[in-house]
Image: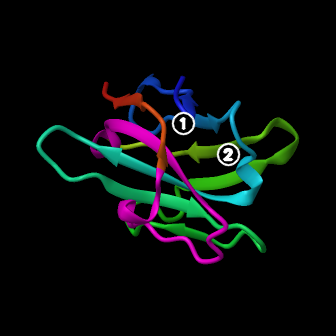
Amino acid sequence: QPQLVESGGGLVQPGGSLRLSCTSSRFTLNYHAIGWFRQVPGKEREGVSCISTGDGRTYYADSVKGRFTISRDNAKNTVHLQMNTLRPEDTAVYYCAAVFAIPFCTGNANEYNRWGQGTQVAVSS
């Protein structure tokens, strides 16, 4: 059983929206910094966004600023990534990841030690 489970991926037209969700049945996400990453074949995994513990400060890659929003739903032990105004270059497998009690999260995948199996996002007309 994976430590994190992503959902919400799919096929959407350019300009459309998707909301990804990341949850766990094994640990409490609120005690962990949660990051979203994406990867396309032949390229390195890219940090998209993250949300820290504590005051919940957030990070966004320049390529998604103003279009993506990360948020926590602690009642449901879930972190969402709302993706608006999607572009074909957003097409990738999206992964969520967690690391315990990081007050200043970053988009560096090496900081995270728990990963989901990914969900495919395809943006195409």
Of 17 and 58, nearer the camera is 58
Left or right: residue 91 compared with residue 29: left
Q: Which residues are magenta?
A: 88-113
What crowding class fits label 1: few (fewer than 14 Cα within 10 Å), some (14-19), or many (20 or more)? Answer: some
Residue 84 position, x and y percent, is: 54, 45
Left or right: residue 93 compared with residue 84: left
How far apart are the alpha carbons under marks 2 and 1? 17 Å
Q: Residue furthest bottom?
A: 104
Q: Which mark is residue 17?
A: 1
Residue 52 position, x and y percent, is: 65, 67
Query: At numbered mark 2, what does the secondary structure look like: helix, strand or loop?
Result: strand
Residue 105 in magenta stretch? yes
Q: Residue at x 28, y 44 (%)?
A: 39
Residue 20 position, x and y percent, is: 57, 36
The correct choice, above or below, for 24 with respect to 81 in the image is above
In this picture the colour scheme is: rainbow
Residue linked to disc 2: 79
Of 113 and 61, nearer the camera is 113
